[in-house]
Image (tube, rainbow, N blue to C red):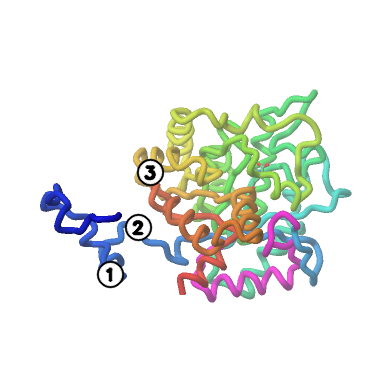
């Protein structure tokens, strides 16, 4: 500014409070930081295919692949060595094994039970989380049983229950129903208890929205619905209060951990559920959120590492205790 010297400026109108005082040095910022992000907060989702070797890259999810059992164990070992406490498994199912009832999902010799056994033997301390829903196994590509073009709620519950029991028998520590059928948490709890798995926890996908951000995941598993969409069971993205209702039901039915999914577009919902319960809250940074960050990073439009950390912090700040994220290893490495 020509001709203006500091002495000519009006006296400062700043009171005694100066928030910048606490931002002056890195050590000070660290000391007063409200939210922490650590590898212990992360869950790594992994895609497993029925082969011993090999990893097939997933185009829309750079850094992720459909892993044979050997590479699955290696990825799990790496996650554990980075301080990540848990993995969540998703199966790539041979199209020849898919049927309308998703029978393969309850096969004790199926892919997920074999993957669980391998992980239990080779990385025993790492927690194993399994997904409970028909879609990877269903010839209709829906999370529930389709009859006359409609996803049937009550007829789906026993199919989910037998899947959860098969997973528990094979060594799942937490089963995670992602299907959004009404009453499924209670149905799973009763079936698990009746089979002697009182210690196997239920991580409920409590507020799972009908989201466009699941696209890359469905490509990875070839699990997109063959007809229609999932709006008759997944939540309407416009709804916030309804998530509290879902939370109330899942808690009453015995859920141990409540999840919100996707994460970043639903921070208000994470915050609401945090306030509504003393149970742990999980959030799933889904495939499309990951793809978006990776794509912009690759184009040089965003600093990928910083954007990933900022998003994860935002999800924690909103109230999530744990975050499912495909970037778990990147984040854990960056956190040191
Ligand atoms: C299936 C399931 C989905 C995801 C996790 N479990 C997809 C869907 O509901 O269609 C999505 C995860 C992601 O996009 O990363 N029940």
- Which segment did they paint magenta? 59-86
Give the residue at x 54% y 49%: 284
Question: Would you say 107 lies left or right of 289 here?
Answer: right
In the rendered picture of this protein, how many numbered marks are placed on residues? Answer: 3
Disc 1 from disc 3: Cα separation: 31 Å
Q: Which mark is residue 251?
A: none
Magenta run includes residue 119: no
Disc 1 from disc 2: Cα separation: 18 Å
Instruction: State whether residue 288 is above or below residue 300.
Output: above
Q: Which mark is residue 25?
A: 1
Of the image marks 1 and 2, the number of the one nearer the N terminus = 1
Instruction: State whether residue 21 is above or below residue 163.
Output: below
Residue 66 coordinates in the image, percent (x, y): 75, 61
Question: Would you say 109 lies left or right of 127 here?
Answer: right
Are the residues flagged by discs 1 and 3 in contact, CB closer than 8 Å? no
Kind of element beneath mark 1: loop
Foreground mark, 1 or 3, reads 1
Give the residue at x 72% y 71%: 71
Asked which quadrant contains residue 38, the reply is bottom left
Residue indicated by mark 3:
274
**Ligand 1 lies in which image quarter?**
top right
Disc 2 from disc 3: Cα separation: 14 Å
Residue indicated by mark 2:
35
Question: Would you say 193 lies left or right of 104 here?
Answer: left
Mark 3 crowd level (few <14, some 14–19, many ≥20, 10 Å Cα): some
Foreground mark, 2 or 3, reads 2
Give the residue at x 73% y 49%: 105
Q: Nearer the viewer, residue 52 or 202?
A: 52
Residue 1 coordinates in the image, percent (x, y): 30, 54
Of the image marks 2 and 3, the number of the one nearer the N terminus = 2
Give the residue at x 69% y 68%: 72
């Amino acid at each position: 500014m020509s001709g203006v010297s500091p002495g000519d400026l009006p006296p400062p109108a700043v009171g005694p409070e100066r928030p910048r005082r606490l931002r002056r040095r890195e050590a000070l910022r660290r000391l007063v930081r409200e939210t922490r992000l650590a590898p212990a907060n992360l869950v790594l989702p992994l895609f497993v295919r029925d082969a011993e070797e090999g990893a097939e890259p997933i185009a829309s999810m750079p850094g992720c692949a459909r892993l044979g059992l050997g590479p699955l164990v290696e990825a799990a070992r790496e996650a554990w060595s980075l301080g990540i406490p848990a993995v969540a498994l998703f199966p790539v199912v041979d199209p020849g094994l898919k049927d309308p009832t998703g029978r393969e999902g309850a096969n004790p010799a199926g892919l997920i039970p074999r993957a669980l056994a391998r992980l239990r033997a080779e990385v025993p301390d790492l927690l194993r989380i399994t997904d409970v829903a028909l879609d990877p196994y269903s010839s209709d590509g829906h999370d529930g049983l389709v009859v006359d073009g409609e996803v049937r709620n009550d007829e789906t519950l026993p199919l989910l229950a037998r899947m959860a029991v098969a997973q528990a028998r094979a060594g799942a520590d937490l089963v995670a129903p992602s299907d959004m059928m009404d009453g499924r948490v209670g149905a799973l709890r009763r079936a698990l208890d009746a089979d002697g798995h009182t210690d196997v926890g239920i991580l409920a996908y409590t507020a799972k929205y009908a989201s466009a951000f699941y696209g890359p995941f469905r490509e990875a598993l070839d699990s997109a619905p063959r007809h229609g969409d999932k709006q008759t069971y997944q939540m309407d993205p416009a709804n916030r209060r309804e998530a509290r209702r879902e939370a109330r039901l899942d808690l009453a039915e015995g859920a141990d951990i409540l999840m919100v999914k996707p994460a970043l577009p639903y921070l208000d919902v994470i915050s609401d559920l945090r306030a509504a319960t003393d149970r742990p809250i999980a959030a799933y940074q889904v495939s499309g959120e990951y793809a978006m960050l990776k794509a912009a990073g690759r184009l040089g439009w965003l600093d990928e590492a910083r954007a990933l950390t900022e998003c994860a912090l935002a999800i924690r700040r909103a109230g999530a205790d744990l975050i499912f994220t495909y970037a778990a290893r990147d984040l854990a490495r960056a956190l040191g």
